[in-house]
Image (cartoon, rainbow, N blue to C red):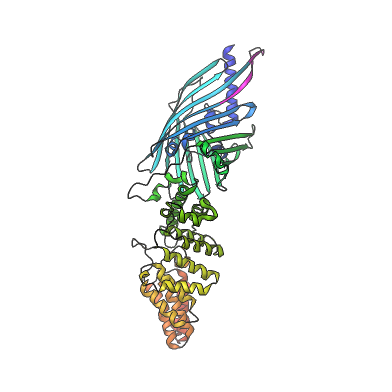
Amino acid sequence: MRWIRFLTAIIILITVSVLSAQYGQAGDFLRFGANARSLAMGGSYTVLAKNADALLYNPAGLANTERWELSLTHAQLFLDSRYDFLSFAYPLGLRSGIGLAIADIGVSKFDGRDEFGTATGEFDMHNMGIMAGYGRWLMGRKFRVGVSAKFLMTSMGENSASGFGGVDVGIITKEVLRNFRFGLAVQNIGALDVAGEKLPMTIRGSVGFRALRSLYLLADVDIVGSTFKPKIGAEFELNRYITLRAGYNMTEITAGVGFAVERMIRSLEKMGHPLLDYSAGLMNPLGNDFGRVSLTLRGKDRTPPPPPPKVSICDHLSEYEGALHKDGLLGAKANVLFGYCNFIYESVEAPLLADPSLKSSYEYFREAYEGKFGGNWTQAIMTLEGAGEVFHQKIHYMYAESKMNREAITEETKQLIQDLIFVGGDSTQYDPRLQYDLGYTYEMLGYLDSAKQIYGDLANRDELEDNPVYSLSLYRLAYLIRESNQDSAIDLLDKVVRTLSWGFYNENGERISYPMFPKYKDNMLADDALLLMGDIYAAKGGPENTQKALISYLDILLFYPNAVNSVLRSAMERSANAYEVLGMTEEASLMRERAGSL
């Protein structure tokens, strides 16, 4: 009978859907995925979705549509079934975007049988979904929201059914703590029966974490009725041309690779900046599938919008994320912004005793300078129109110091700082800091005469007295001449104590750490200067110099009781030694007890 044939076909089609999605509920084909990129990350994509691909995951991602995008995905599945997804997105101004997508899963030329097993000819089976949606930034670009609707059609041979598939709503936050992002989507609200089944309401929760500039980690959970399905994924940008991806969704291990085709073949730019993605599913107990391919065409780059007035640009990094991988000055600007905000967050805004790594900052800056412009980046920055607004002295020193902090100082570090000084910028306000960084690099590499020369030049610039670089140069120069010219070293250290008695301050008068050198991250330099001054007096010898050394050590305990324990302990131990030299054994014993209690 006809209804038996129809029921049999529906059961077969659901079985095919289970092979691709593993949920076993209506509308599984819509959970298969929008593109090879999402499939490669195990479907953990709710917080990363953007453009028209967001229609399957989270319509809020449509707000991130920066330019038109056309994408086609094809996946060859089990039993000769196949899945296709076609999507198109278009930006509406600077804050919103719309999208349209079609998903189709089916089998062609299926052998039909009646209730007696007699062949009735070939027929096709298809499930199709048509989706449309809208996404927009809200609340001064603090988060994105979106809404979409879907219409479903199912057919087998001459039989067909269709109906409303429900409404999806979603939200994606801006970056939280610079590196985290959260997303939530509720899908299939108000769905109607189609061929006797209705799409179940689904809740998707997601968190994304940018561990490094080139590494993004994701975790999702899908809640369908009482079923929980966690997913994890990762995306690693190997270089400007290739991106590697992997994931796991409790059913299969997934992996994939993406190619920036237009970067490999420049003549293809006229096609619309094509991207090619491939992914494969492994370990699926019901059958592996290796044919997931996506081709994406994108329109011309658009300049990201400026942040709202009087609002920190670091609160709006989400708007520039899409430009991170773009070529030229636009991509460089986005990477500079991410590097700058990470530098500020990891150092200036961090607690005084924090131990900043600055690794993320370094990766962003390196991509902005060398990744976008190659080995000739110095020439490009000096000659390219508009480069001075992006690559200025403040960004130069942040790049230099993030590299100095990230790894051991080498000849490569020295060359980078020399190149940054040579390139210059639109202002020389921060040039002394770069000069100091070069001097410190010379010192660490053993070029002591060159280091002394730079420190001396900076120490003789009285206009820098309000700049931390001035006092730091005095201290480093005193340290280098502490044995060869003790009196001059003491004079330099005395000036440090007088000019920087209470720590470092930024341009807003706020106390800050000096993240480049953990020795000073407690915001104190005068305590280190007094400790070194005491050591020089002690080395000179004699009762008078021993008394001066003792006074220097006691000044640390009196005026800087909040200094780091290592400095306080050294001051106590050396005070005890000075007391002993002066014959004050009782005081020496008490001081040693204090040192031991720290």
Viewer-nearest residue: 490 or 518: 490
Q: Percent x, y for residue 511?
A: 37, 63
Residue 443 relative to residue 460: left or right = right
Q: Percent x, y for residue 539?
A: 49, 83
The residue depicted at 54 percent of the width and 61 percent of the height is 407
Vertical side of 174 occupied by 394: above or below: below
Vertical side of 104 occupied by 565: above or below: below
Identify the main secondary structure in magenta: strand
Which residues are drawn in magenta? 105-121
Viewer-nearest residue: 289 or 204: 289
Viewer-nearest residue: 427 or 324: 427
Residue extending furthest toward the right: 118
Vertical side of 26 occupied by 247: above or below: below
Q: Percent x, y for residue 342?
A: 45, 54
Viewer-nearest residue: 184 or 507: 507
Q: Can the viewer see residue 359 in this picture?
A: no
Q: Percent x, y for residue 158?
A: 56, 14
Q: Can the viewer see residue 545 in this picture?
A: yes
How many numbered dots are placed on residues in this image?
0
Residue 264 relative to residue 150: left or right = right
Magenta-colored stretch includes residue 131 = no
Q: Name the quadrant of the N terminus.
A: top right
Q: Which picture quadrant has residue 343?
A: bottom left
Magenta-colored stretch includes residue 112 = yes
Residue extending furthest toward the left: 310
Residue 289 relative to residue 563: left or right = right
Q: Which picture quadrant has residue 132?
A: top left
